[in-house]
């Protein structure tokens, strides 16, 4: 027995030594992938030396004497820190995800949709449409990326290659090309639009609810924005061609959501390749995405100079979608005009959001601008490559896209049918009834453009005029740009292609594609797009609310009627946020006439729920008997509606909201919808206690009223939270339920815990919710896991750029073994920031590493 114990002890020691050795080997291997950040690095292709300073967070500030060297160095540092993310992003944009993950159903469905929609073809067209200057910058950036990856194998660059190789996936290291950068622009343009899925969703609802259900969808689910009680981004009289005394029209020429005579009963809604309704993990998009930005003019700041703030709300991921960096020509000259810092997309040259030495800018999504339309195609029953328009047969353009698999699975050919409107994107094979009609997608993203020329133009802009001139080339995705400059000016500009539709064409549901009468008539000229400069109120805010009132569209009709037709539809669309964040931001801006960076931080971290303030008082008036203790009801009545991490009331309210949407909306729709439109529609229903929507169609023995459903939802919520957090409500915390997990693609969902623990981070508790300024959006169909977040936060102090602040949600590095993989997450979730240094002296003083690139 003693000898057996000794043998077992020896075996255990050997196992521990082997495990320790393996751990050490893994550690050494992973650390080998980390970039060189100090000393000297010889780089073929450089014209002269480049200096890169990195601070304690690993953020690079690049100094070069030529434009070529500046962007080549940006390509190098982004590839150093984020190569795998760049690799995955370009494969996503070009519909080649299967080459990275092998034969995987989710990846394949995404690839089929992307190739059918034609992002790869559109990105290549954008290369051809780009100016020589833009192409030169993109090529310099690509040269830098290629200089970094040259001679390296996959395992030298990222851990993902080694792990995927265990699954039999072989990934060749391909050179970076300008089209790879432009492909990511397609991904972002698609992600920031939800018109396509909104049209499909409305169509499905009409098919399910029938004609009687139109009232539900039109009046509650897609209710008219409350223009009388909630502000728009711009006010009438501030923006051409609106006149201060312009009348408010009852409606535009768009008419009802569903044009009379439109038959949606036999319209195909299943996307090609079987892509799921939520567009899957690789193609996140939709209503949960939002954003805030605002700019406060000099009259309302302590310094007498503007302060600009921005926090875009995007899908949660690891690493962050953003990369912080600075690009500095030394010296700044006509030949090398860049002196800019801010947030870039890995794989994309330039700075998307940030400031230079003269101006600052921030962006939010123009949810109101509908740039995607679905057309019902009348296919020839004898030849599915032909379709009818105006009684005439037309040939579809047929394109074959070949999808390859990295694990050696035989490639798959995908037939793409392209009509005069665009590609057919719904899958006829999913329908047994061949009378069901497919849908073709027309969207502005297919218009070739020099988008990155606009980005670089903004990076170089020095005043309002050059800023606006740069944005004339920003055709998609349309964004709300707020502006400030060192001279004290502030402004707003909406760029992008705004389609002009024929009368009666709302753009909210598919329309008949067998007639040219539904063709777009053109686009609103740039000079007529909403903009304002130094408004009298002294501040501008945009949070995905409507940009302007309906009066603007009537004025457009007067101004453009002779060119496009008086009865044309100039209304941009009806997909917008219902003002919960915007109203709160406006209140907080107006509550202080001497704003500082600190007061703006407090606004960005605000967790007030306007929806809770609308709903909860009515709920707490009900009699719950013994189902909910009166002490809990009284405690809820003391809530300030702040959904802070330590708030127990927030936990109970959000559990109630989950139950309420499930019982009211889910019982009628067959799924539980999300969005500020649902919150606003529920608020409208409060004033109609006997509305049929309150009645649960799944019960046949009674007709429920408002109070019945409110009581039932609150009792169920109390029971759920008690089970999850315990009986003592005083110990409840919202952040115990509401968490964020930063998941890497694709390994973060591998199902292998040791791999997921390596590449993912979390869950960590967060505050806020889907409708709060501090955005942490979640779905009632998957409570309470965070799906979209304030992906970064920026505050620019135009009185002293070195006093500006910034933060991203994870860290600067995409290497799991790096100290900068998730070192910003705790700061981000607790509304803390890093200093956004800009002057060379401040950057040098904060530098913890300095790398010199020399021509090799």
Image (spheres, rainbow, N blue to C red):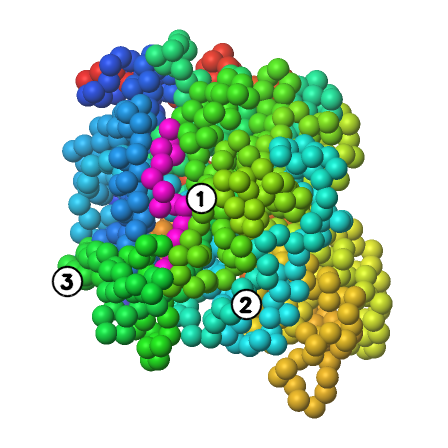
Mark earlier in primary sequence (3, 2): 2
For the residue pair 389 and 133, the one nearer the viewer reads as 389
Q: Residues within 10 Å of mark 1 (few under 14, many from 20)?
A: few
Q: Residue 528, image x and y in percent?
A: 55, 34
Q: Is residue 723 above or below residue 478?
A: below
Question: Is there any visible trace of residue 652 in the rendered image?
Answer: no
Residue holding disc 3:
410
Q: Residues within 10 Å of mark 3 (few under 14, many from 20)?
A: few
Quadrant in the rendering for residue 685: bottom right
Residue holding disc 1:
522
Q: In the rendered picture of this protein, how many numbered marks are placed on residues? A: 3
Residue drawn 75% across the image and 37% down it: 245
On the picture, is 760 further left or further right than 531? left
Q: Is residue 530 above or below residue 616?
A: above
Residue holding disc 2:
260
On the picture, is 14 further left or further right than 812? left
Q: Residue furthest front?
A: 562
- Tell me the quadrant of the picture where the C terminus can be found: top left
Q: Residue 544, image x and y in percent?
A: 59, 45
Residue drawn 62% across the image and 33% down it: 240
Whole-angstrom CA distance, mark 1 to mark 2, is 23 Å
Q: Residue 607, image x and y in percent?
A: 68, 47
Q: What range of the chain is rendered magenta?
A: 440-453
184 falls in the magenta region: no
Q: Residues within 10 Å of mark 2 (few under 14, many from 20)?
A: few
Query: Element at badge 3?
Result: loop
* Foreground: disc 3 or disc 2: 2
Mark earlier in primary sequence (1, 3): 3
For the residue pair 701 and 496, the one nearer the viewer reads as 496
Whole-angstrom CA distance, mark 3 to mark 2, is 48 Å
Residue drawn 50% across the image and 62% down it: 509
């Amino acid at each position: 027995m003693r000898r057996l114990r000794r043998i077992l002890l020896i075996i255990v020691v050997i196992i521990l030594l082997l495990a320790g050795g393996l751990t050490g080997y893994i550690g050494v291997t992973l650390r080998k992938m980390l970039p060189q950040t100090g000393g000297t690095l010889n780089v073929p292709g450089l014209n002269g030396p480049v200096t890169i300073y990195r601070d304690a967070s690993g953020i690079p500030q690049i100094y070069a004497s030529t434009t070529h060297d500046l962007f080549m160095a940006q390509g190098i540092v982004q590839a150093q820190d984020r190569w795998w993310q760049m690799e995955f992003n370009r494969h996503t944009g070009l519909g080649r995800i299967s080459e990275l993950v092998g034969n995987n159903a989710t990846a394949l469905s995404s690839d089929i949709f992307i190739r059918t929609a034609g992002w790869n073809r559109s990105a290549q067209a954008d290369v051809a449409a780009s100016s020589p200057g833009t192409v030169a910058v993109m090529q310099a950036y690509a040269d830098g990326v290629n200089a970094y990856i040259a001679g390296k194998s996959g395992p030298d660059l990222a851990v993902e290659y080694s792990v995927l190789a265990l699954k039999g996936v072989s990934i060749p290291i391909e050179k970076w090309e300008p089209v790879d950068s432009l492909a990511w622009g397609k991904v972002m343009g698609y992600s920031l639009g939800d018109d396509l899925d909104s049209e499909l969703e409305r169509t499905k609802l009409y098919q399910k609810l029938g004609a009687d259900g139109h009232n539900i969808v039109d009046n509650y689910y897609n209710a008219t924005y409350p223009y009388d009680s909630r502000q728009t981004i711009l006010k009438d009289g501030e923006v051409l061609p609106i006149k201060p005394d312009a009348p408010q029209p009852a409606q535009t020429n768009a008419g009802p959501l569903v044009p009379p005579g439109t038959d949606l009963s036999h319209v195909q809604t299943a996307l090609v390749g079987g892509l799921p309704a939520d567009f899957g993990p690789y193609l996140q998009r939709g209503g949960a995405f939002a954003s805030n930005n605002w700019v406060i003019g000099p009259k309302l700041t302590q310094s007498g100079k503007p302060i600009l703030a921005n926090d875009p709300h995007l899908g949660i991921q690891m690493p962050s979608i953003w990369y912080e960096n600075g690009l500095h020509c030394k010296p700044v000259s006509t030949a090398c005009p860049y002196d800019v810092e801010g947030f870039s997309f890995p794989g994309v040259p330039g700075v998307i959001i940030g400031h230079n030495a003269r101006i600052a800018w921030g962006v939010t999504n123009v949810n109101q601008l509908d740039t995607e339309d679905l057309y019902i195609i009348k296919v020839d029953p004898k030849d599915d490559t032909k379709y009818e328009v105006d009684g005439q047969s037309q040939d579809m353009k047929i394109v074959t896209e070949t999808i390859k698999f990295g694990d050696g699975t035989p490639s798959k050919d995908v037939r793409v049918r392209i009509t005069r409107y665009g590609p057919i994107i719904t899958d006829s094979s999913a329908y047994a009834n061949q009378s069901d009609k497919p849908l073709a997608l027309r969207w502005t993203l297919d218009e070739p453009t020099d988008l990155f020329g606009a980005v670089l133009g903004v990076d170089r802009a020095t005043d309002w005029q050059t800023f606006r001139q740069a944005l004339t080339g920003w055709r998609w995705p349309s964004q709300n740009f707020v502006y400030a400059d060192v001279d004290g000016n502030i402004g707003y500009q909406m760029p992008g292609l705004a389609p002009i539709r024929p009368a009666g064409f709302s753009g909210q549901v598919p329309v008949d594609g067998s007639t040219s009468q539904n063709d777009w008539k053109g686009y609103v000229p740039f000079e007529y797009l909403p903009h304002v400069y130094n408004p009298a109120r002294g501040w501008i805010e945009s949070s995905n609310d409507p940009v302007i009132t309906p009066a603007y569209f009537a004025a457009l009709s007067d101004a453009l009627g002779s060119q496009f037709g008086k009865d044309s539809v100039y209304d941009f669309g009806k997909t917008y946020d219902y003002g919960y964040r915007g109203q709160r931001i406006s209140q907080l801006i107006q509550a202080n006439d001497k704003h500082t960076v600190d007061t703006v931080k407090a606004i960005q971290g605000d967790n007030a729920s306007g929806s809770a303030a609308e709903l909860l008082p009515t709920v707490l008036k009900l009699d719950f008997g013994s189902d909910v203790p009166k002490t809990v009801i009284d405690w809820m009545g003391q809530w300030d509606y702040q959904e802070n991490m330590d708030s127990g009331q927030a936990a109970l309210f959000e559990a109630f909201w989950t139950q309420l949407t499930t019982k009211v909306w889910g019982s009628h729709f067959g799924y539980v919808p999300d969005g500020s439109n649902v919150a606003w529609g529920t608020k409208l229903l409060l004033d109609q206690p006997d509305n049929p929507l309150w009645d649960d169609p799944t019960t046949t023995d009674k007709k429920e009223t408002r109070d019945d459903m409110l009581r039932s939802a609150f009792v169920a919520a109390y029971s759920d939270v008690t089970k999850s957090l315990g009986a003592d409500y005083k110990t409840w915390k919202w952040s115990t339920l509401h968490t964020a997990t930063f998941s890497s693609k694709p390994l973060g969902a591998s199902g292998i815990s040791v791999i997921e623990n390596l590449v993912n981070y979390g869950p960590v508790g967060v505050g806020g919710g889907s409708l709060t300024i501090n955005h942490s959006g979640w779905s009632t169909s998957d409570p309470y896991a965070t799906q979209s977040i304030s992906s970064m936060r920026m505050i620019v102090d135009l009185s002293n750029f070195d006093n500006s602040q910034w933060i991203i949600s994870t860290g600067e590095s995409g290497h799991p073994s790096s100290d900068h993989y998730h070192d910003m997450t705790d700061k981000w979730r607790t509304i803390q920031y890093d200093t956004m240094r800009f002057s060379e002296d401040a950057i040098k003083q904060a530098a913890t590493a300095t790398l010199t690139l020399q021509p090799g």
